[in-house]
Image: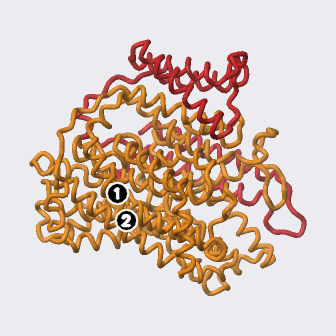
Amino acid sequence: METLVEAIKLIADPQVIITVLLASIFGLFVGAIPGLTATMATALLVPLTFFMDPLSAIAAIVACTAMAITAGDIPGCLLRIPGTPASAAYTDETFMMTKRGLGAQALGSSLVSSVIGGLFGAIVLMFAAPSLARVAMNFSSFEYFWLACIGLSCAALVSSTGFVAGLLSLFIGLLIATVGMDVISGSPRFTFGSVQLMGGVSFVPIMIGMFAISELLNSLLNGTARQRFAKPQKITGIFHGILPLIFKYRKNVARGSIIGTLIGVLPGAGGDIAAWITYATARRFSKEPQKFGTGHPEGVIEAGAANNGGLSGAWVPALVFGVPGDAVTAIAVGVLFMKGVNPGPRLFETQGAMLYAVFLIFLIANIALLPFGWLAIRAASKILSVPRPQLMAVILIFCVVGSFAINNTVFDIGVMLVSGVLAFVLSGAGIPIAPIILGIVLGPLLEQNFLTSMTIADGSLLAFFERPVAGTLGVFVLLLWSIPLVSAIMRGIRHMSQARAMKLT
Amino acid sequence: MRKAPFLTGAILSLLGVGVIAEAMRLPAIPGQTYGPGFFPAVIGIGLLVFGAIYAMSARHPAQPVIQLEGEGIAPDEMEETAPERPFYGALASLVIGLVATIALWESVGFVLLMSIVLTIFMILLGVRFWNAALVAVGCTIMVYAIFIKILMVPLPAGLLAPLGL
């Protein structure tokens, strides 16, 4: 109770309130514009958070992403272009609803279900995180090694373009993480004699490059850089008749919130995947699956709840273990490290009030979605008529100063440019970018815990299975790794038998 | 055969070889089984093996994978908004502009550099000169003021230093 009062005092600070307000407006704007994702919003926000206290920084990221994910539904519904990838799962559905004149219902139901999903995820975070942290207090380097493994493996496994592409992306991230002086022995690795690289490649310029510059390059190359969006129709009365609708589909709201949050908690998978999966489960368990795709709100409600739930859920492993659940929390963990706040179970003892303040921010941000979302929908046609070239120029200048401002070196602008081109080329070749970021954040955690464990155990790998929790986690990781292997073998066998069958006929 | 994935896989595989070679050169710590070269070696092997698999699988295009994370645009989105031609000019100006920014950062200064780079960038995207220049200069000065005055980031004044900005 005492911590709660202290937490309320912390967020009553005007700096925190103003930060949350500004970050929310920024998030709404970025989310509502197609091509600008929630991750990009976070990446652009990071240089500014660098000048805030840790609480304001996290509050800004939380508010900004929640708003962006929800605002992403708006252009999907009005123009059939998802504002952020998390809305892509049900863009067609909401657009069909708009076509049938149910645009207000589509936006209203996705907004309200987003709020419920987000609140559910925040409540789970509030209660699950502290109790998990108590368990995690006894964790040693062995357990942390496996947790980092789980985070990395999930990131690769759930990658959209197949697990080989995901793994490659992961190894690139891990490789970037090894650049610089090795923390244990102090020997320089992959620095090529450069003094600038001795301290490692800084994380913020890489992220800005990979999520913002690469997007700019992409839109220049596919010719959407100058495209103006069609003028959307005006939507009013989004809350009219929404509560009965939500009540009618309360099962979907509940299932979407629960599955979404769980997927978010799973390291490596975030809101985008939660939306796709729950849209599918909504259809699977629906009484009228034939209506899906024709402008039916059921899937929209379930997936709308899920992507916001996933967003909150992803913070559970990030805060408790320092193992981020998605690209956004990977960035947040990076920011906390830069501020000298190391996420992990000890944080719950030393910074309890601050963590509770973060949880309260989650609740507030999700409730604030209602008025803010309403405003964004009202302003949709204005937001969508912002001219693209000018917008891109503004993004570009923020990329440059943002990269520079972290360490005040021009070298980092170069890092940004190189990472931007790299990410652009890689995604052109079908390799996803999010695992790279997880690799960069989790790489040092993985290596340090491995080397510490090996020093303790005198080089015996079996020690990783000797402690009960570590052993369980280890077996889980091995099972996880065997999934793609087994499925590849199964596919091989099926191919062979098919080929044989072809020969016979 | 899809060229881009094949080449990328092959290049990453070669990178893996380089990483392994470099990892071997890292010193071992006496008395410890795993030194600073161990992790880079594992990463190198990973890049080598999976880069090769990726390149090989690109030679036989697999069945289409479900698009999950919205990377790439679904085909039916494309038909509604007719794509324009790629903006190679603006693309080049972005990359060259950034390289110039890095090279001339201290000597020319933030305001002048960014104003010019952004103006050229926007003009190449079809924005009229006065509009582009106004946005570029306005933005640059605003960002400069915020970062210098409020956030205390030492952005270089460069050629405009005599103006006492």
The quadrant where residue A475 appears:
bottom right
Q: Residue at x 41, y 26 (%)?
A: A389
**Does residue B111 appear in this view?**
yes
Badge 2 sits on which subunit? A
Q: Residue furthest bottom?
A: A468
Amino acid type of the residue that numbered disc 2 sits on in the rendered structure:
Gly
Residue B40 is labelled as: none
Q: Secondary structure at mark 1?
A: helix
Q: Is the C-beta separation of discs 1 and 2 under 8 Å?
A: yes
**Does residue A274 appear in this view?**
no
Q: Residue at x 50, y 75 (%)?
A: A479
Residue A369 is labelled as: 1
Q: What color is chain B drawn in?
A: red
Q: Position of residue A323 (x, y in %)?
A: 58, 66
| In this picture, residue A15 sits left or right of residue A38 | right
Amino acid type of the residue that numbered disc 1 sits on in the rendered structure:
Leu
Q: Residue at x 33, y 70 (%)?
A: A257
Q: Nearer the viewer, residue A229 or A497?
A: A229
In front: mark 1 or mark 2? Answer: 1
Q: Position of residue A270 (x, y in %)?
A: 43, 60
- Please determine whether, in this image, residue A306 is positioned above or below residue B27: below
| Colour basis | by chain
Q: Secondary structure at mark 2?
A: helix
Q: Position of residue A193 (x, y in %)?
A: 82, 39
Q: Residue at x 50, y 39 (%)?
A: A212
The chain in orange = A
Q: Nearer the viewer, residue B124 or B17?
A: B124
* The C terminus of chain A sits in image quarter: bottom left
| In this picture, residue A157 sits left or right of residue A474 | left
Residue A118 is labelled as: 2
